[in-house]
Image (spheres, grey):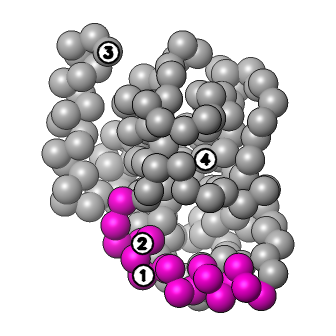
Amino acid sequence: MNQMKYTLYLLISLNQRNMSSIYNNADNETIIARINLLSNESKPLWGKMKVDQMCKHCNATMQVAFGKQTLKMNFLMRLLGRMLKNKAFNTDFGKSSPTAKEFKFEGSYDFESSRKEFAESFSQFAKGTQVIKLMDHPFWGKMTYEDWDKLMWRHTDHHLRQFGV
């Protein structure tokens, strides 16, 4: 990682200890800047996903919030999600955590298009809470706008850190 990217990564990491918000324009732009640091050559520091797959994965998770992506969960998964919600929303995501099948992308995808979709979707949150259309998540259960804020911020940050940005 070159020195400029590393310095930006450190500054961003320090800022995140203060729990940034997807709805705040400056914080949102910080995430988009990190997304734009990704390249087709970016390699994961852990996990199996390639950078194009990660961009597709993150975009798909945001589509749930926007009401454009549906998830099918059986009773046990719904129960598990509700039990894990508080811990998951208040700590960093674990490495190589399980992923819903709707969020798994195993093929090869155009990197530039995938990264652009990822950044454009994330930027929607800066418009405010009105972009959130789903308040009863199939896995996590009842959601507040603060829950969405934590989930989307932590999930996106987790995957950007996975790729060193």
Q: Earlier in the sequence, mark 2 or mark 4?
A: 4
Quarter where residue 94 is shown: bottom left
Q: What residue do we see at 66% from left, 57% from top?
A: 99
Comparing labels 4 and 1, the label whose residue is closer to the camera: 1
Query: Which region is colored magenta?
Result: 75-92
Label 1 to label 3: alpha-carbon separation: 34 Å
Q: Which amino acid does label 3 sit on?
A: Met
Magenta stretch, main secondary structure, is helix
Quadrant in the picture for the N terminus: top left
* Residue to which mark 1 is pinned: 86
Total count of labels: 4
Label 2 to label 4: alpha-carbon separation: 16 Å
Q: Residues within 10 Å of mark 3 (few under 14, many from 20)?
A: few
Q: Dots 2 and 1: beta carbons under 8 Å?
A: yes
Q: What residue do we see at 44% from left, 71% from top?
A: 88
Quarter where residue 5 is shown: top left
Query: Would residue 14 appear left or right of 120 to someone viewing this image?
Result: left
Q: What residue do we see at 62% from left, 28% from top?
A: 50
Label 4 to label 1: alpha-carbon separation: 21 Å
Quadrant in the picture for the C terminus: top left
* Residue to which mark 3 is pinned: 1
Q: Dots 1 and 3: beta carbons under 8 Å?
A: no
* Residue to which mark 2 is pinned: 89
Q: x%, y% of residue 153?
A: 42, 57
Q: Which of marks 3 and 4 is nearer the N terminus?
A: 3
* Residue to which mark 4 is pinned: 58
Query: Would residue 161 appear left or right of 101 to someone viewing this image?
Result: left
Label 2 to label 1: alpha-carbon separation: 5 Å
Q: x%, y% of residue 142?
A: 59, 88
Q: Residues within 10 Å of mark 4 (few under 14, many from 20)?
A: many
Report if residue 21 lies within the magenta region.
no
Which residue occupies the foreground of this view, 119 or 92?
Answer: 92
